[in-house]
Amino acid sequence: MVAEGVPVTVKQEWQAFWLALGFLTRIPMPMKIDYSQTLMNRSSLYFPLVGLLLGGLYAAIYAGLSAFWSLPVCIGLVLAFHLWITGAFHEDGLADSMDALGGGHTVARRLEIMKDSRIGTYGAVALIVALGLKAVLLVEAEPVWLALLVTPAIGRLTPLLLMRCLPYVTDPDTSKSKPVAEAFSGQRLLLAVLFTVVVALLFSVWLPALLAVVLVALLWGASLKRQLGGYTGDALGASVVFTELVFLLGLTL
C-alpha cells in the first residue's frame, strides 16, 4: 500500500512498477491500481527491472534444484517455471509473429493471422527451436546462475527501443500490447537503457548485451518495418525471445 500524503509522482511510479510486474507475469498486484493509459505507458520503464527480478527468481530456484538434480534437469525445470510465471507471454508473441510473417502475403493478412489464437506450423517450429536452443545455451553457460539472472533483464530492453522507433500498426482493441503501445518518452527510454547498462556492467556482460540488443533492434525492427509497417504486441514479445537467445549465444562464446 502507498501511504496517504506520498507525492503523486512517487505514487504513480510505485503503481507503474506493480502494473509492469502484473502485465509481464502472473504475480498478483498487492495494491489497488488507478489504471489509466498514461500509467500503463509509464510502466514500460520498469520492464528491464521486472526482468532482473525474474532472473533473480530463476537463479535462486536453480541454486535450490542443483542440490538434487543434474544440470539439464535443473534447466528444464527452471524453463518450465519461467513459462508458468510469465504465462509464456513472450513465447506466444514469437509463435504468432512467425505464423503471421511466414503465412501472410499482405500486411492485412499478417495482422489477421496474428490475431488468430490458433498456432500454425511456423509458430510451432519457432517455439520448439527457441526453447530447445535456450535450454542448450543455458546448459553451456558458465556460470549458469549468471545467465539465468541477467538474461531476462537484457531481453526486456529491446521492445522499448522498438516502441520508441516504430509506429504501432495493429488494432488497439484486440492487441495484447494496447496498454503500452501508444506512447513511450525518450526520457523514460533513457532511464531504462541506463538501468540495463548498469546491470550489464555490474556483471561484466556488457559486450554480449550490447550486441544482442542492437542487433535484434536493428534487424527485427527493419523486418517489422518492411513486412508490417511497424510493430505489434506479438512482435514485441518476439523481440524479447530473440534478444535473450542472441545474448546467450554471445555469453557462451
Image: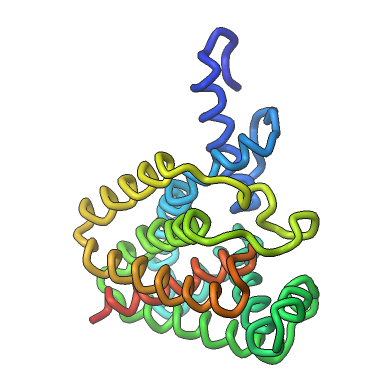
On screen, residue 120 versus residue 66, left or right, reads right
Q: Residue furthest top?
A: 5
| Count of numbered circles on the image | 0
The answer to whether residue 113 is above or below residue 39 is: below
Percent across and percent down for residue 100 are 68, 81
Q: Nearer the viewer, residue 137 or 8?
A: 8
Q: Nearer the viewer, residue 88 or 76?
A: 88
Q: Is residue 58 visible?
A: no
Quarter holding residue 98: bottom right
Quadrant (top left, top right, bottom left, bottom right) of the N terminus? top right
Residue drawn at the location 29% of the way across and 70% of the way down:
211
Residue drawn at the location 66% of the way across and 42% of the way down:
28
On screen, residue 212 versus residue 202, left or right, reads right
Residue drawn at the location 57% of the way across and 19% of the way down:
2
On screen, residue 67 versus residue 11, left or right, reads left
Q: Nearer the viewer, residue 18 or 145?
A: 18
Quarter holding residue 234: bottom right
The answer to whether residue 31 is above or below residue 53 is: above
On screen, residue 77 versus residue 27, left or right, reads left
Percent across and percent down for residue 40 are 62, 41
